[in-house]
Amino acid sequence: MSRIKALAKETAIYGISSIIGRMLNWLLVPLYTQYLIPSEYGIVTELYAYVAFLVIIYTYGMETAYFRFSTAQDTHEKQIFNLSQSSILLTSILLSTFLIVFATSIVNYLEYPGRERYIIWFALILGIDAISAIPFAKLRLEGKSKKFAIIKLINIFINIGLNLFFIVYCTKVAHQETDTPFKKFILSFFNENNLVDYVFLSNLIANVFLIVLMRNMIFKVKIMFERGTIRKMFRYALPIMVMGLAGVTNEMLSRAVLKKWLPLGFYEGYSNQAALGIFGAAYKLSVFMTLAIQAFRYAAEPFFFSRAKDLDSKNLFSNVMHVFIIFSSLILIIISLNLDIIGKLFLRSPAYREGLIVVPILLLANLFLGIYYNLSVWFKLTDKTYFGTIIAVFGSIITILMNYILIPFMGYLGSAFATLICYLSMSIINYYLGQKYYLVPYQTLKGLLTIIIAIIITLIGYYMIYYIPIHHKLFQLLLIFLFFIIIYFINQNEIHRTLKRIKS
């Protein structure tokens, strides 16, 4: 029991730090959409999309391999740490050197001529991220969750602070009418015409502080390469890298390829680069569902494993799924029906709000992603995790094909539908395989009915708000209340049984 409690405590710390960190970074969206025009934010969106792929390549599953081999009976943790860190150091130097050497070719392909500095900065950012990955994994292995969370949050706060300093404060000083020595000092390094630079530069400086905070673990490594062990670690890690790349493809591909696959002049009045910026900003608003899913994963995974041997575990898993669907459907409705307010609050420039139409689609897509994670309990408990890799790769193929087909006809709306089709397909495949290998009596019809009702209510509310002149806030409350009433009637038998158990 004490071990389970310790696990729950560490899960909470990791989960809270991760969610808070993601939420804090997300709060930069209003800043960027106020100070950056869509074409500038398009640069940020595109480069960070490519970075998401490169992060997987830089670490190539070595974190998980470190966990696996450092806890094996025939190995020593210190030796595995030195091997893992030595490998990451070498490959990071090689990969970053490659990016720097070919910086000009890369920026020309991306259509950012003369901005080689972006590639150089990201080569350093990625290198630092990679060489700190194994030390972070070591902290987790040693149960130092508080130290892990504190370092992560410090890194995030530095990044946010520097963004505020450069983009807000320095811009304000630059616009002051009177010349002062302090203004001259600010203008000696600050150029308000290149605000995108400071988004990336803030990230780089924050990562330099990361090295300072973790210097004792990063630089006290003993460089070593033991061929037999490292070869086994690579064999173990590479399938994990493939699964990671497949997952990133499903999430980030649309933002990486939209500019290239969108026909020129598709959106009248602004460029493909601006369209990417609008889509990237609107995509961020799906974070409400993403955070709910992330919180669920941190709590659910240890819960599923700890309850797997219970006699009624499968019924419990079914109930967890149903509650998740109801809760996620409610998020879909509430966020979609309040996009007029949320859009003004977080997308500060009206130009970005043209992309709000993709948000309900992305919320629904992430709802199915949450269902997929819920269903994944079967291959985790039966040690058939290779099915997770197969499904993820299948999802990435769907993502590539759907984006390639839909973007030329539907623009960034096609990218949103591609994400929905991908996660829906993965959920369906995962469900049927799970029913074959680990039968859980999911309340499938009720779950589907709940989602369909949520979609219908969302569509009614969305179109009435924007196209019919009514007092829409009152109407929104009535629609949400209607959802609760319908859900109650669908689940009234289960609710009554639960209430009887509580009373008894």
Image (cartoon, grey):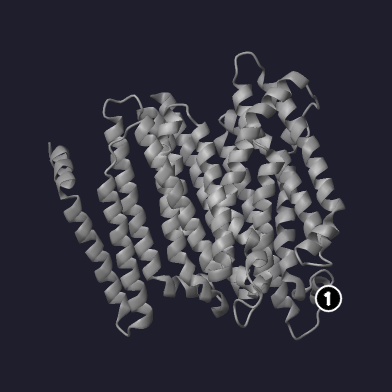
On screen, residue 338 versus residue 27, left or right, reads left
Q: Image quadrant for the N terminus?
A: top left
Q: Quadrant of residue 231?
A: top right
Above or below, 9 relative to 351: above
Task: Decide if residue 369 is in sight here.
Answer: no
Q: Position of residue 271 (x, y in %)?
A: 66, 76
Q: Residue at x 38, y 61 (%)?
A: 332
Q: Quadrant of residue 128?
A: top right
The residue that disc 1 covers is: 184
Task: Decide if residue 410 is in sight here.
Answer: yes
Residue type at the position of mark 1? Lys
Q: Position of residue 470 (x, y in %)?
A: 30, 83
Most foreground residue, 314 or 73: 314
Q: Image quadrant for the C terminus?
A: top left
On screen, residue 346 versus residue 242, left or right, reads left
Q: Residue at x 41, y 58 (%)?
A: 364
Label 1 sits on a secondary structure element that is helix
Q: Residue at x 80, y 47 (%)?
A: 96
Q: Position of residue 27 (x, y in %)?
A: 55, 62
